[in-house]
Image: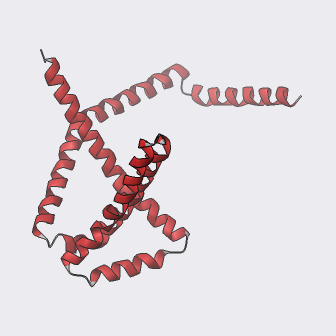
Amino acid sequence: METFGRRLIRAFWFTLAVLFLIESWLWDNVKIALVRLAGALGLKEIETRLREFIAGLSPLATLAVFALPAITIFPLKLLAVAAIAHGHVIAGLSVILAAKTLALGVTSFLFDASREKLLQIGWFETLYETMLRVSRWAHERVEPLEQQIREAKKFLKAKLARALGEEGGSLFLRKLALLRALVRRRGAA
């Protein structure tokens, strides 16, 4: 039998793995959103210029450019903490969340643009490889739960299909549409 302490430790590591995967998901998706936004605003040439600028830098200068988003949001975080301390909790948390999200997206884009140069720095390459190992570890921790969710979804889908029958699904949707139309007519009258 597993002790309470062991379950607590396992829950801690599982939570840490989930948080890491959420951060990874944000890393990928916020970057995509920012690139799309830049394209929609007609700022696509900035991406090209930035990539060309980074290509001309040394690895250490590239590291400075890569660290810039994290450094620039630090004062915003301090202001947000001050706002929270003065009772403006929602405003402060909103600023922290917005600044963190924006910096994450920009940092992710910068990493894509400067990966080769950054990996020329020994300790950075070691850090990057460590992050890849942590990512694999996090996926291993969360995979059993993901599998259980997939199986439960499949089970519920099959059960619903059996309950409604082969034609039942479309019949159910037709009856729902008919009911909606009836309610709308009564509301309009």
**Nearest to the observer: residue 4 or residue 86:** 86
**Where is 14 relative to 161, above or below?**
below
Residue positioned most to the right: 189
Q: Residue at x 45, y 51 (%)?
A: 95
Horizontally, is 43 left or right of 188 in the view? Answer: left
Horizontally, is 67 left or right of 189 in the view? Answer: left
| Residue 23 visible in the current orientation | yes
Residue 51: % across, % down: 34, 78
**Where is 161 relative to 62, above or below?**
above
Residue 20: % across, % down: 27, 45
**Where is 37 relative to 151, above or below?**
below
**Where is 17 relative to 176, above or below?**
below
Which image quarter is the C terminus in? top right
Horizontally, is 99 left or right of 141 in the view? Answer: right
Residue positioned most to the bottom: 56
Residue 161: % across, % down: 50, 26
Q: Residue at x 36, y 64 (%)?
A: 72
The way the protein has been coloured in the rendering is secondary structure
> How many numbered circles does the render carry?
0
Residue 131: % across, % down: 19, 54
| Residue 143 visible in the current orientation | no
Q: Residue at x 83, y 28 (%)?
A: 187
Q: Residue at x 42, y 59 (%)?
A: 102
Residue positioned most to the front: 86
**Nearest to the observer: residue 87 or residue 162:** 87
Residue 5 picture quarter = top left
**Nearest to the observer: residue 18 or residue 76:** 76
Which image quarter is the N terminus in? top left
